[in-house]
Each structure stands twice: as structure tokens, then as C-alpha cells.
Amino acid sequence: MRPRLAFVAILAALAGGCSQSPSDPLAERGRQVYLSQCTQCHAVDPSQPGPVGPPVKGSSRELLEARILKGSYPPGYKPKRPTNVMPPQPALAPEIPALAAYLK
């Protein structure tokens, strides 16, 4: 693949990370929060594994609340990875609805 075409393909893949319409303001806010707060550990494309964190596309609001607020898992949830390196991030509590909309 030519370098320019490869670059365009990468941009297209990044832009379509989740299925939410860009016209949904809540999902767009979630995308912005995800890109600024989550991609240090999770991949830019939330359907892919990141350097430290697993894919998070499709994560339920219940899972997001447990992981972000308490650093734990909801009852009965089986983690994708056996590690527990994600610390609680209670400052992101107001952004959970937006993240859930984006990752849906």
C-alpha cells in the first residue's frame, strides 16, 4: 500500500472507532473524554487492545462506573485481563454517561 493511502486508511479507522453518530453530542463528548483520558492505557480505537488496557468498546455503564469510580468490577463480571492496574478516577464521574454513549 502506498504511504498516502495507508495514512488515509489509518485516519478512517481512527475516526470510526465506535458506532455512534458524530451528530450525537453526548457520544461526541465521550469520544473527547476517551481520547484525552483513556488512550494512555487503552488503544485510540476502543475496539482494539491498548498497551496496558483491554478493548473497551461495548462496555456497560455498570462496568464503567465500577472501574472508574472504585477500580473494581461489577458483581459477577469476568475481567478480560487478570491485572488490576487501573486506579480509581473519581474525577471522571460526571463523564461516565458520555463515555458510555461513545463506547456503546
Image: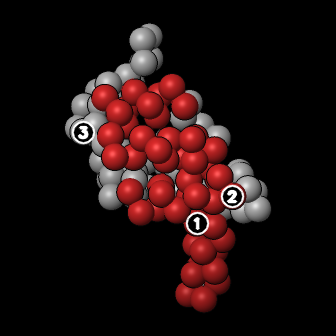
- The residue closer to the viewer here, 55 or 6, is 55
Q: Which residue is mark 1?
A: 14
- The residue closer to the viewer here, 20 or 29, is 29
Tell me how far mark 1 sits from mark 2, CA to CA. Answer: 18 Å
Whether residue 95 is situated above or below residue 17 in the rendered picture: above
- The residue closer to the viewer here, 18 or 102, is 102
- Name the amino acid type tagged 3: Pro
Badge 1 crowding class, 10 Å Cα cut-off, few under 14, some 14 to 19, many 20 or more, is some
Q: Which residue is mark 3?
A: 87
- The residue closer to the viewer here, 31 or 6, is 31
Q: Which residue is mark 2?
A: 25
Q: Position of residue 47 (x, y in %)?
A: 55, 47
Quadrant that contains the N terminus: bottom right
Q: Which element carries disc 3, helix, strand or loop? A: loop
Q: Is residue 46 visible?
A: yes
Tag of residue 44: none
Tell me how far mark 3 sits from mark 1, CA to CA. Answer: 26 Å
Which tag, 3 or 2, sits closer to the chain's start? Answer: 2
